Amino acid sequence: MNSETKPIAKTPSQEMRSQLLKSKTFLLGNLGVAFWAICAIAPGLIVNRDPAEQNLIKKWTHPFTDGFVLGTDRSGRDVLSRAIYGAREIMFIAPAATILGVVVGVMLGLVMGYLGRVVDDILSRIIEALISLPVILVALLALTVLDAGRATIIGVIGFLFAPLIARTVRAAVLAERNLDYVRCAELSGENSLYVMFVEILPNIFGPIIVEFTVRLGYAVFTMAGLSFIGFGTQPGSPDWGRTIFDERTSLLSNVWWPSIIPAIALASLVVSINLIADAIQGVVDK
Amino acid sequence: MSEPTLEFENLKLAYMVRGTAREVLRGVSFAIQPGEAYGLVGESGCGKSTAAYAAIRSLPRNARVLSGAVRLAGRDVLSLKKNELRDLRANTVSMVYQDPSQALNPTIRVGPQLIESFTVMGVDKHEALKRSKAILHKVQIADPDVVMDRFPHQLSGGMQQRVVIAMALACDPKLLILDEPTTGLDVTVEAEVLDLIRNIRTEYGTSVLFISHNLSVVRSICDKVGVLYAGKLVEEGSAQNVFEHAVHPYTIGLLKCLPTHGLRKDAQRLSTIPGFLPSLGADLPTCVFVERCSFADETCRTVVPQWRSLGTSSVRCHHAEKVAGSPGENEIAGVPVEINRKIKPILELVNVSKSFHQGGQSFKAVQDVSLSLYAGETLGLVGESGSGKTTLAHTLLGLHAADAGGKILCDGKELLPGRRRRTLEQIRAIQIVFQNPDSALNRRRSVRKIITRTLKHLARVAPEEIDSRLRSVIAAVRLTDGHLDMRPGQLSGGLKQRVAIARAYAGQPRVMVCDEPTSSLDVSVQAAILNLLADMQRESNTSYLFISHDLRVVRYLSDRIAVLYLGRIMEVGPAERVFDGPHHPYTEALLSAVTSTTSTTTSRIKLEGEIPSSMSPPSGCVFHTRCPRRLDGDICSTVEPPLTTTPDGGVMRCHIPFEKLGGRV
């Protein structure tokens, strides 16, 4: 009778994948992120100069002179090598912090959205209070009080992002919760944890991925900002934020490259991430 | 003959999907004469709405006209310039959409919205206000000032649709396009809107293009009908002719799928149309219906059928004479089932109430409902929207907790209110099939996963038996192994509903709540699902609580019927008695609002006013404010009638003695 077993459409995830692969912004963004990921994992493949090697005689060499493609800084260090090596810290800390924020935020959002009522009321108020705190101030406070290592930075950024993510996830859960499949699961005697994490969670992957990419961009910025004001990285480290801070005064002597190059590097990473976020958002919203 | 108001000339239209053109309209030609009402019918996906939008050239961006023409009041719609098109839409044609709550701007009061439809034509403000009031009178709104001062959400669905129709009439259009204008409205409201449309036609002489999947509604409104299938008209003729002497196999199939007046499951199975509507843009070089037609032969597969005249209808079929001459083919008799009401009922509700709190006020959505349900029996639950049908079902399932004081007994054991306090065994005993399978199935899971989980977790089937049980459940709902690894999004609506039924059945429930299980489906699919539900009930002796706004569907499946109004039981009784009488005045009014494909509407009992709010139910009999049989004196408005037992073992809540209540004439 119903012999027609040919699928009449692709599954939503197949459809999304094929649309993403056709999107130019998505490909371009991935190209940018992939480049910086390679720089972070194996900078030696791209440049062979040590980013810490000083040569004061050659300080402030112009780009394309003496074999320094992007010139040297105030200590005669190779700007190109430093820009490439500068991706290391940020490409580890920003994703780690974002993942932490997403994991915590998704759990909070699921609980708030699904259980609702008192639980939602209490958690919502706490989250609103947390969101109202200025990010940099909290980060400064935490880094001053606690040991200013990688773990603290990851923890602080993750902790500050979790409430924002929780709110987005909560809204997505509220829409799902009204669908009848949730009723069906409840009437199969499933407990709340199963309904939240096994039934609902896969259906809100879309907004979660969008949130992840958007937050990743912010995390890169926050991390760069913190190292710009001297937290989280050691003096002399090639990290972009720190380098921009260290070299910013040479702009006054018309030596732009030591500070502008890392700034461009930072911008290219953030723009690439945002291109991906945009493309995914476009597909998810459809 | 004068020039037609709307004329389609061999219109071929395609949607571009990822670079390929998918043909939606495969050469549609028809004409609507001035003052004529033309109905376009067919199942979803056959191109009805696309045709309507093409008439005013309001097509999605990916639509491409391949060939043909559309002429509206003598002008070629498809070649008009932007400003000419705007002018045409402002002055010559109006459209009414399915959902009035979406057609009105929720943030603007009704008055300004209505006045705007006059001012766009250049009428000055003062005059526009005057005309707005006049037009609201025309659509039978008694107090225009009050309505104009309201926001759309403060009006009921029927009132909103009247306002939309009023706006459509503002320009005194030559053509009024109505796209499923009553779908989603209650039968009583539907009947009012249809009356209104009929009055407008006689008064204004407007031509109407009426689009609906509901054949009986079209029958009651239209002079002429065109049956659309896969983007091609297959039959056209006067409404009376097409419905009474349908010639094309598709039209005949559609008409037969409907549970017609008085048809019952034990008397006859519903006919279905085998197979599926061809997918959008599929290659259909010959007769478009050939794959699903029982008359199809080699000619049908090689030669395109041309229009042929048969009596007053035209039809595109090679075998029209043969089809017309064939007797009512293979009507399969149903299997009568004896229900034993002497033993204890499976399910008993005693004085069940459910109140909700809203803004500090509390109101009873369901009040003191007592019902019983026997093994293998179907109890139909009817009433307008807002009567508490779904609330009652959800309370029964434990999705929300019933108020203290009532009792729900299943197999003689009391069920605690709220599913969290019930045992797995008790949860398993009562299951539900929801209206919309898109919502009821987790779209991220395969059919196999959905059903296996229920078998494993709810039915506690041993791991080694799961596979065989899965196969038997799937076979019971007439799905094949090939469907197991598909996700819901890859299945058609009817197949999805089968999966939802399989899931509900997987736990072998004693009672199944069917909440409008066929309302979102096409008629041919509806027939198959109703047959399936009847078969499965007979095989498993499950009891059904069947909720539907479609009274014919309820009658087809139900053994007994309970009528709910404002959360209270108005009457309960055997299906035949409730339908044929003597019945409650409310039931009488509901029944008289039902349109039929076999006859045009005769006189109908009108319900005055709106369904009252359950926040402040009327005193005495809650129905007295709208009751057409209200007794003289004030007994109805002061004393709530008790539930009295009727001779057939049912109950009735009315002051009028049972013998004097109305019946079908």
Image (tube, rainbow, N blue to C red):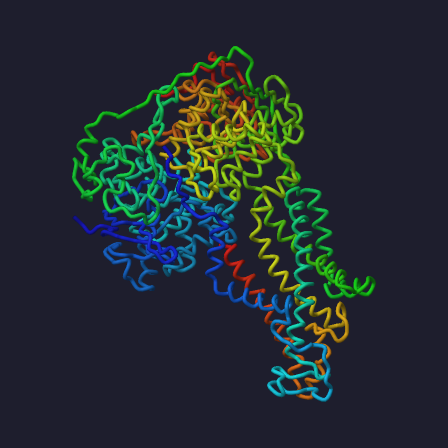
How many labels, in total? Answer: 0
Q: Does A226 sit above or below residue B664?
A: below
Instruction: Name the image quarter holding residue B264.
Output: top left
Q: Residue at left 64%, top 67%?
A: A40
Image quadrant where one finds the N terminus of chain A: top left
Q: Where does the image place residue B649, in percent across and percent down from the top left? A: 49, 13
In the rendered view, tell whether residue A63 sits above or below residue B35.
below
Q: From the top left corner, tell me how far across and down residue B139 is, in percent.
A: 39, 43
Where B69 falls versus B581 (above or below)?
below
- Residue B514 at what x, y percent from top left? 49, 29
Residue found farthest to the top: B342
Which residue does the image show at 70% across and 58% down from the upper left?
Answer: A158
Q: Residue B388 versus residue A67: which sits nearer the camera?
A: A67
The quadrant holding residue B202 is: top left
Judge by depth and name the residue closer to the eye, B109 or B259: B259
Q: Quadrant of residue A278?
A: bottom right
In this rendering, is residue B426 above or below B113? above
Residue ranking furthest to the right: A145
Report x, y in % for residue A121: 70, 46
